Image: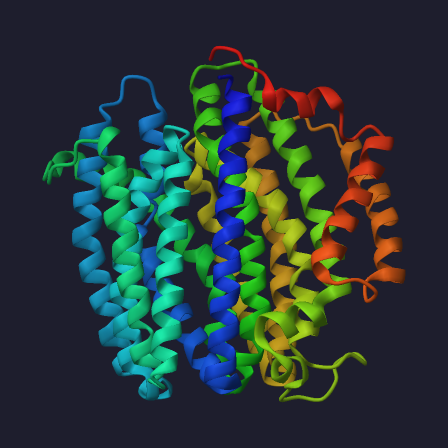
Amino acid sequence: MSYTRAVAYNTLVQIIGKVITTIISLFLVAALTRYLGVSGYGQYTTIFAFVQFFAVMADFGFFWILVREIAKPGTDVDTTASNILTLRTIIGILVFTLSFLIGIFIPQYAAFKWGIGVVALASLFLSLNSTYVGIFQNRLRMDKAAITDASSRAIILIITLYLIKLHLGLSSILWAYTVGNFINFAMSAYLGRVFIRFRLRFDFDYWRKLFAEAVPMGIVLVLGLIYFKIDTFMLSLMRTSRDVGIYGPPYKVLEILLLLPAMFMGNVFPIVTKYIYQNDERLAGAIQKSFNFLVILGLPIILGVIFTATRIIRIVAGENFVKAHTIPPVFGLAATSPTALQILVIAICLSFISSMFGYLIIAVGKQAKLIAPYLFLVVFNVGMNLILIPRISYIGAAIDTVLTEVLVLFFSWYIAHQYLAIKLNLKIIWQVLFGGLIMGTFLYFFANNFNLIVLIPLAAIIYALSLWVVGALKKQELLILFERENR
């Protein structure tokens, strides 16, 4: 199987898996929003946003160090993965314990401090599981990760629905995540045993090397999460749980959509890394194809969400979230969840492209060069939130997210170009704009005339045909998915 076909297969498997897990997640969000209400769901969102800061500290770049190291020729995968998993277990226990202890002493979190402890334990298992995901990703066997992820999500949903039926509180319901994430880790360890013979390893010299490699990446990840997630944290401290609750569903939709470039680039990453280290001439083609794919994928998502935001929020969270607001209209627009979603989705296409440059920077081992720009992004994002949140709450947070993503794209592009000879053909942008114009026209007139189950495939077909007409989609590139050739 060729690398191109292997990447296409793994991306397709992940998309199918993520479609399944996304559907499950949407059912889960729908159940929780309707049961907890706007304020209760705000507490739920705050808990996960708070613990996620510590989850990034627990990872501290070890995931991508693992993926990069085992992609190098001659690497002892067993030794590398076992050392990293042992180290991450120790760090994870310390960091997530710290998250619970800190949460106890934040006055605004007093009502749900025990929930923070439950989610911290659940996040520990999720952190350990990502080591096996790195192995699956390197071996281009993400079907195994998709199976474990979908299974654990289904378990979480079933347990959550049962606990809701028992009319239990938020902290009790959150135990569903601990059980589900533990099962996810256990299944990954079982399926991954054919790729790695795990043993506890305490090679302190190797750990010091890992830390030296991981510190720049860890700092970048922490800073990246701060500018990406700090808005929810600041909303929880500066406004109310109701504000966080209104912002929660649109941000959940944003996070789901951002999985798409992460899945694609996650599969491309090991191959691009190998091309870079082997000075392979196919690198330029891989980068161009990645750019084309992400541009083609990004624009229809923006248009689709803008025209159907109200219907999406109604399905995901319920009618209360469609109408709920804590501030008057902003710029003539209702300050509701759908409006926040329409603003946030603009950051999607920007993030799709910036993620590609970010992965390339990691692949060449220059992640330390991102530290200074990311420090600036954190200062910019926090500063803008301090200005906007007191005035226009979650709408201000959404606007700040878009502005920050503009800067992320610029910095990631600039740094990647310093270390790689990237010469992108930008013709695809004009082709995609044409396809977007045709699709947007269709949605403008018919977005409210069809059920979403019918509307989405129709819009996708119209968009694909438009791209085919202008040559953005070629028959030869589609047929490559079915080619059989040796690596």
Examine the rendered structure and indicate whether residue 476 appears above or below residue 235: above
Left or right: residue 37 versus residue 478 is: left
Does residue 237 appear anywhere in the picture?
no
Which residue sits at x=31%, y=55%?
126
Residue 92, by quadrant, is bottom left
In the rendered image, the residue lying farthest to the top is 486
Percent position (x, y) of residue 411?
58, 46
Does residue 57 appear anywhere in the picture?
yes
Left or right: residue 225 versus residue 307 is: left
Percent position (x, y) of residue 84?
22, 40
Left or right: residue 124 versus residue 202 is: right
Colour theme:
rainbow
Percent position (x, y) of residue 378?
50, 61
Examine the rendered structure and indicate whether residue 416 appears above or below residue 129: above
Q: How many marks?
A: 0
Examine the rendered structure and indicate whether residue 455 appears above or below residue 396: above
Which residue sits at x=37%, y=52%?
151
**Depth check, front residue: 9 or 371:** 9
**Depth check, front residue: 138 or 429:** 138
Percent position (x, y) of residue 114?
26, 80
**Depth check, front residue: 411 or 194:** 194
Residue 107, by quadrant, is bottom left
